[in-house]
Amino acid sequence: MAKPKVYITRKLPQVAIDLLAESCSVEVNPEDRVLTKQELLQKVIGRDAVICLLTDTIDREVLTAAAPQCKILANYAVGFNNIDVAAATEYGIMVTNTPGVLDNATADCAWALLFAVARRVVEADRFMRSGKFAGWGPMLLLGQEVTGKTLGIVGAGRIGTNFARKARAFDMKVIYTDISPNPTFEQVTGGVYVDKQTLFREADFISLHVPLLPSTYHYVSEPEFKLMKKTAILINTSRGPVVDEKALVSALKSGEIWGAGLDVYENEPSMEPELAALDNVVVLPHIASATVETRTNMALMAVNNVLQALRGELPANCLNPQAFKG
């Protein structure tokens, strides 16, 4: 009996590919780049499963090419805004993601950004490397204190909770906002629920941990920046379009806010060009989950989702169980 055919749109940690290859015929994109639309359309044809990335746009056209043979699209990400889940369901294709395994890494990265911006770490590094340091001075590269400040969390899910829990080590007051209060978040973090306007007005640091939805598109824009303290810092490790990048540039240039730390961008992989020239923003190339442990666990989870689907089981992380044909 022929092995199920699986296509992987970009190389993943080898241990996961080896596990999949034990029972499947596996083809992996040999180049370290995103496939073109035409390449993706060709590669999904005749596959029983596809492991895709957040950088792959899986729209109705791609799903039409994948159907009817494809049983599952296993997204190598916790987010899935790159996939037309409704269309996949119409075609009877299950869609899965990789929740939970990247919570620590993403929260840790958000903290790294927060400290880097608050204490001007990247700016200071450039200053030192350039040979400008002539000795200690009382006004040299003054930053913002973190301990004891007010931390605002937007989105009280797994990553937001993980991030906020760590604030206790710095004696911070935690406030948060979401579509509704979250008792678990409050119990774990000691956080207090407030409305959006109160959070943006009172927080010294604001960290975004929401999915990209129509309701969160440009969630932070000119009105929010006007509410923020001039000493406030914005951190975004969620999704780029949650922040209006042009409005952010304006707020950073005018001193409306102190600074920002970004791991994601509105038009990724590009960022608003003016950001590159600003010292009060730290920019990372979407690496919040980029630890050896996390990226390996994400790959293993995606592979196990595929293996479950190919065995005729409902995958543990299925986003559209109505597509299951067990």
Image (spheres, grey):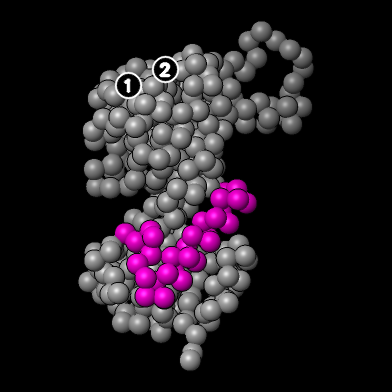
Q: Give the range drawn in magenta.
A: 290-319
**221 on left or right of 35:** left
Q: How far apart are marks 2 and 1 (CA)?
A: 9 Å
Please name the residue shown 25% across and 25% down the image: 195
In this orientation, which residue lies closer to the viewer: 271 or 83? 83
Q: Which is nearer the N-term, disc 2 or disc 1?
A: 2
**86 on left or right of 191:** left
- Counting from the top left corner in percent of width and height, residue 259 is at 47, 26
Check residue 7 in the rendering and tell me which mark sits there, or answer none: none
Please name the residue shown 62% across and 27% down the image: 121
Check residue 173 in the rendering and tell me which mark sits there, or answer none: 2
Quarter holding residue 272: top left
Specify whether residue 56 is painted magenta: no
**122 on left or right of 52:** right
- Counting from the top left corner in percent of width and height, residue 256 is at 39, 21
In this orientation, which residue lies closer to the viewer: 282 or 155? 155
Badge 2: few (under 14), some or many (20 or more) residues near its Cα, within 10 Å? many
Quarter holding residue 96: bottom left
* 32 is higher (above) or lower (below) than 231: below
- Asked if disc 2 and disc 1 are in contact, CB closer than 8 Å, the reply is yes
Specify whether residue 313 is painted magenta: yes
In this orientation, which residue lies closer to the viewer: 275 or 165? 165
Asked whether the viewer can see residue 323, the reply is yes
Badge 1: few (under 14), some or many (20 or more) residues near its Cα, within 10 Å? some
Quarter placement of the C terminus: bottom left
- Counting from the top left corner in percent of width and height, residue 105 is at 54, 42
In this orientation, which residue lies closer to the viewer: 320 or 216? 320
Say which amino acid is labelled 2. Answer: Lys
The residue beneath circle 1 is: 192
Quarter holding residue 47: bottom left
